Image: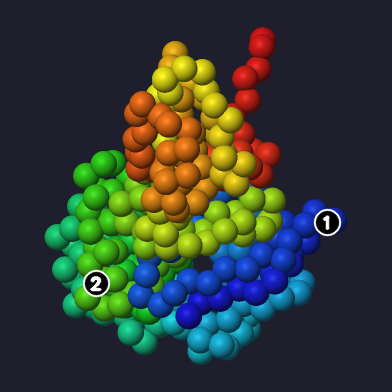
């Protein structure tokens, strides 16, 4: 299990991580989401052992990650800006990774030539951003490690290659039990692949749950009343309310069935529950954290 507890990191007086805690269950795909500046990349650099925490702990299987080469050999990462030597080709970076990770598979490396349409002897710096991202996946996925950490992993890839990469990643999760932590702003894409979700803001992890639990715990209701809108039950935790004509829409935190039962006292003519997307959940959760979409008159 990959875990951060009460993590604090400060840069020049700015608290980038403020007692942030998260737990990535083994064998899952964990989506880390949040607004720009929330601390996602900072916590990823702790999970990969690049940064030393000011306080708190970052562990894998109970062992500290920072300055622990044996633990780091179980983790491989692709950052938003993948590092490579300026004069290196894919083949040369593969040799570097093979020297660092004993599990590196040259057999898989050869098979990847059929998937990624790249010249593995060409210098990476002469490739486009999308090609460089493909090169990163080519080399990294040959390491055959337990933990894969990705920061905006498919940014710059075309739709076909995005689907190809996700297919490879999910294949490793299903067949080898690989654990994947992925930070991305593409919530629609994460919704298709993630088991668990963590939402960050201002250096804190506001919540983390399985995706199914998160969707079950937030309800979108569309309601029509026989007359004016009545007073709603006080115990309902309403995140958002709007209406168009006689159709009222509510976003409510809680169990769907219990909320529907409580709403019956309002004697609605129509009461319909609509599944929320991960993007909607993120927007309304962040609205509660004072990060809402605001109407501005220009």
Disc 1, SS: loop
The mark found on residue 57 in the picture is: none
Disc 2, SS: helix
Side of 166 relative to 68 (left or right): left
Side of 49 relative to 6 (left or right): left
- For the residues labelled 1 and 2, say whether their Cβ atoms are less than 8 Å apart: no
Q: CA distance from mark 1 to mark 2?
A: 43 Å
Give percent across and percent down for residue 231: 58, 30
- Residue at (52%, 61%) from the top-left corner? 208
Q: Quadrant of residue 9?
A: bottom right
Vertical comparison of 274 with 55: above or below: above
**Structural crowding at the residue carrying mark 1, measured as other residues with C-alpha within 10 Å and reported as few (<14), some (14–19) or many (≥20):** few
The mark found on residue 12 in the picture is: 1
Give percent across and percent down for residue 214: 45, 55
Could you tell me if residue 43 is visible in this image? Answer: yes
- Residue at (35%, 75%) from the top-left corner? 27
Which of the image's four quarters has the C terminus? top right
The mark found on residue 174 in the picture is: 2
Residue closer to the observer: 214 or 84: 214
Mark 1 and mark 2 lie on one chain; the one further toward the N terminus is 1
Give percent across and percent down for residue 274: 35, 38
- Residue at (56%, 49%) from the top-left corner? 34
């Amino acid at each position: 299990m990959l875990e951060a507890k009460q993590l604090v990191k400060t840069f020049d007086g700015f608290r980038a991580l403020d007692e942030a805690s998260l737990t990535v269950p083994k064998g899952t795909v964990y989506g880390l989401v949040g607004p720009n500046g929330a601390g996602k990349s900072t916590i990823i650099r702790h999970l990969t052992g690049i940064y030393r925490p000011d306080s708190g702990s970052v562990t894998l299987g109970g062992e500290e990650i920072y300055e622990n080469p044996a633990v780091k050999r179980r983790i491989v990462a692709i950052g938003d800006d993948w590092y490579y030597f300026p004069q290196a080709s894919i083949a040369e970076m593969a040799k570097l990774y093979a020297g660092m990770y004993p599990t590196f598979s040259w057999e898989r490396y050869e098979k990847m030539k059929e998937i990624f349409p790249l010249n593995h002897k060409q210098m990476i710096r002469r490739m486009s951003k999308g090609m460089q991202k493909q090169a990163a996946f080519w080399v990294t996925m040959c390491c055959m490690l337990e933990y894969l950490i990705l920061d905006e992993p498919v940014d710059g890839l075309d739709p076909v290659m995005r689907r190809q990469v996700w297919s490879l990643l999910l294949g490793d999760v299903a067949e080898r039990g690989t654990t994947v932590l992925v930070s991305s702003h593409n919530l629609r894409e994460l919704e298709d692949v993630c088991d668990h979700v963590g939402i960050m803001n201002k250096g804190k992890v506001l919540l983390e749950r399985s995706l199914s639990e998160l969707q079950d715990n937030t309800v979108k209701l569309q309601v029509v009343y026989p007359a004016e809108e009545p007073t709603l039950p006080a115990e309902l935790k309403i995140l958002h309310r709007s209406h168009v004509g006689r159709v009222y829409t509510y976003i409510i935190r809680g169990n769907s069935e219990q909320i529907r039962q409580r709403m019956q006292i309002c004697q609605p003519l129509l009461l319909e529950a609509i599944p929320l997307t991960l993007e909607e959940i993120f927007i309304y959760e962040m609205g509660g954290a004072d990060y809402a979409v605001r109407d501005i008159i220009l």
